């Protein structure tokens, strides 16, 4: 009796997979490698950015520790915030562009149109 239950469950599973493929999963499987590659590029970009920002944070902490006057401290802080703002703004634009190119690249279609 257990063998029939296993066979019927397997058959039901096979039918479910076939149904999913018929209704749209099949086109997505062709995207697999390109999608994974695009996501890896996006992740690599984010990790690189975070690593660079950590290095910058450590560098600024060292500069702050060596400040002798409040004015020097303020100058280092201001430069830090200006640079961080610029870098975060640039990185946001870069990630947005990469994200918009992700689906067309993965689907093998035309490039996305710029905003």
Image (cartoon, rainbow, N blue to C red):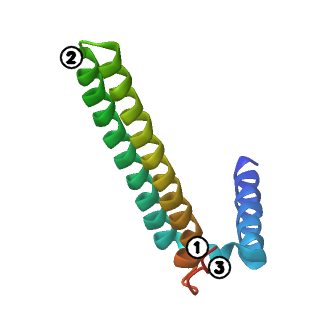
Q: Is residue 3 visible?
A: yes
Q: Earlier in the sequence, mark 2 or mark 1?
A: 1
Compared to 54, does 21 lie above or below? below
Compared to 16, does 56 lie above or below? above
Residue in view at x 65 percent, y 77 percent:
26
Q: Position of residue 33 (x, y in %)?
A: 46, 71
Instruction: Identify residue for label 1.
Output: 29
CA–CA distance in space, label 1 to label 3? 6 Å
Pointers 2 and 3 in contact (CB under 8 A)? no
| Residue 88 falls left or right of residue 49 | right
SS for callout 3: helix
SS for callout 2: loop
How busy is the neighbourhood of tag 2: few (under 14 within 10 Å), some, or many (20 plus)?
few
CA–CA distance in space, label 2 to label 1? 56 Å
| Quadrant containing the C terminus in the rendered view | bottom right
The tally of labels here is: 3
Residue in view at x 74 percent, y 56 percent:
9
How busy is the neighbourhood of tag 3: few (under 14 within 10 Å), some, or many (20 plus)?
few
Pointers 1 and 3 in contact (CB under 8 A)? yes
| Residue 13 falls left or right of residue 102 | right
Pick the residue in front: 46 or 64: 64
Residue in view at x 29 percent, y 19 percent:
64
Q: Position of residue 56 (x, y in %)?
A: 30, 35
Instruction: Identify residue for label 3.
Output: 27
The disc label shown at residue 66, or none: 2
Q: Position of residue 46 (x, y in %)?
A: 43, 49
């Amino acid at each position: 009796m257990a063998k029939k239950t296993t066979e019927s469950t397997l058959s039901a599973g096979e039918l479910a997979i076939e149904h999913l493929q018929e209704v749209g999963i099949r086109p997505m499987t062709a995207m697999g490698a390109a999608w994974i590659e695009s996501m890896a590029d996006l992740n690599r970009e984010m990790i690189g950015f975070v690593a660079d920002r950590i290095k910058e944070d450590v560098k600024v902490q060292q500069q702050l520790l060596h400040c002798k006057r409040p004015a020097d401290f303020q100058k280092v802080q201001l430069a830090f915030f200006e640079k961080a703002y610029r870098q975060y703004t640039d990185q946001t634009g870069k990630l947005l562009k990469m994200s918009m190119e992700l689906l067309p690249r993965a689907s093998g279609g035309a490039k996305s149109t710029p905003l």
